[in-house]
Image: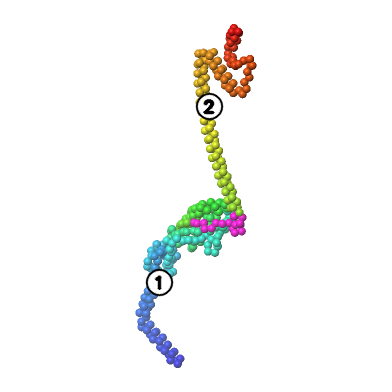
């Protein structure tokens, strides 16, 4: 059984040798044609609609603007193709995949934990392809260096409260300036502080400090409110006193003006009839004084009070002559 099988194999080999000798040129042409077809088929490639293709010839970038569709290239190692989604909005977190936060040292030598969400896209495809092997790692390092510089210039209270927005704005500007200097071909779209908190070991102390500051602000606000209220009340009282003083001043001025006019009128009368005016004024004053007195003493021998003190000598003489 084995000998006939061996003889068959030998016959097949001999037949192939005879065919090769008779059809050598034809066989070579067929092989070359098949190889050419294989080479041509291996050089055909497609670029998806959401990507841009780039061709490297012997390791050098020769084209970076291959549009979506079917294209042809020379077989490796002569040319190779790189396909990249240049319109994609890329995202990363500074903490990465395994860490929740990154620890930083603030300007007042406190440790703070934070994480930053970053969005970026390709702005220059040529620089993105030839500048570095992995721009995502370099971008993460640039963001880390920039946020370290910013946090080192602030105290821990600023980082936890009012400095968040400042960090986000300045971080994007500072990191983009560095990437442009590296010719990364990457444009940072946004930077967001996802987490900013003190270390877990010191969280309780930070909360107590924050509560104390909150209580301080509350008391300051209450004191300022009371001060404003008291100031408003004092201003109202001062304005009231001022109005009363102005009113009293007006009344006194009017009274003084009236008294002056009255005195001028009396002076005019006095100049015309001095004795009569003096007697009249004296009598009016005595009436006022006596009306205010509670006790009036009378001489038992007189029935009336003689108030005509002016010219008393003449009156006595008249009384004596009558007697």
Q: Is residue 24 left or right of residue 264?
A: left
The numbered dot on residue 42 is 1
**Which quadrant would the N terminus be assigned to in this image?**
bottom left
Please say whether residue 313 is visible from this viewpoint: no
Q: Nearer the viewer, residue 119 or 286?
A: 286
For the point 55% across and 60% down, which residue is it?
A: 101
Q: CA distance from mark 2 to mark 1?
A: 117 Å
Tell me which numbered mark, 2 or 1, is placed earlier along the sequence.
Answer: 1
Scheme of colours in the image: rainbow
In this view, the residue farthest toward the right is 300
**Up-down relation of residue 197 to residue 245 (above or below):** below
Residue 264's x, y, as percent? 51, 19
Q: Nearer the viewer, residue 93 or 37?
A: 93
Q: Nearer the viewer, residue 200 or 29?
A: 200
Label 2 residue SS: helix
The magenta-colored residue range is 191-207
Q: Is residue 199 magenta?
A: yes
For the point 52% across and 30% down, which residue is it?
A: 247
Q: Is residue 289 magenta?
A: no
Residue 25's x, y, as percent? 36, 79
For the point 55% across and 51% down, which residue is it?
A: 158
**Up-down relation of residue 1 to residue 137 (above or below):** below
Q: Is residue 262 left or right of residue 45?
A: right
> Which residue is tagged 2?
252
């Amino acid at each position: 059984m084995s000998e006939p099988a061996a003889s068959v194999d030998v016959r097949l080999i001999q037949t192939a040798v005879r065919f090769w000798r008779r059809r050598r040129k034809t066989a070579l042409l067929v092989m070359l044609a098949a190889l050419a077809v294989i080479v041509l088929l291996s050089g055909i490639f497609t670029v998806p609609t959401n990507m841009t293709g780039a061709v490297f010839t012997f390791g050098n970038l020769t084209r970076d603007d291959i549009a979506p569709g079917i294209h042809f290239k020379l077989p490796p190692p002569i040319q190779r193709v790189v396909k990249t989604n240049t319109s994609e909005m890329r995202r990363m977190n500074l903490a990465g995949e395994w860490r929740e936060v990154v620890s930083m040292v603030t300007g007042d030598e406190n440790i703070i934990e934070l994480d930053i969400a970053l969005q970026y896209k390709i702005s220059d495809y040529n620089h993105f392809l030839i500048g570095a092997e992995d721009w995502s790692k370099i971008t993460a390092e640039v963001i880390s260096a920039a946020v370290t510089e910013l946090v080192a210039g602030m105290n821990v209270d600023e980082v936890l409260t009012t400095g968040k927005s400042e960090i986000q704005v300045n971080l994007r500007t500072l990191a983009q300036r560095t990437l442009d200097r590296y010719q990364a071909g990457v444009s940072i779209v946004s930077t967001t502080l996802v987490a900013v908190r003190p270390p877990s070991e010191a969280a309780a102390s930070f909360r107590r400090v924050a509560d104390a500051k909150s209580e301080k602000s509350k008391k300051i606000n209450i004191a300022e409110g009371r001060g404003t209220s008291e100031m408003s009340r004092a201003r109202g009282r001062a304005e009231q006193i001022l109005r009363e003083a102005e009113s009293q001043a007006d009344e006194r001025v009017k009274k003084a003006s009236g008294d002056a006019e009255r005195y001028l009128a009396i002076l005019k009368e006095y100049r015309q009839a001095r004795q009569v005016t003096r007697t009249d004024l004296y009598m009016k004053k005595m009436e006022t004084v006596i009306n205010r007195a509670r006790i009036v003493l009378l001489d038992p021998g007189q029935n009336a009070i003689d108030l005509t003190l002016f010219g008393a000598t003449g009156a006595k003489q008249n009384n004596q002559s009558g007697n």
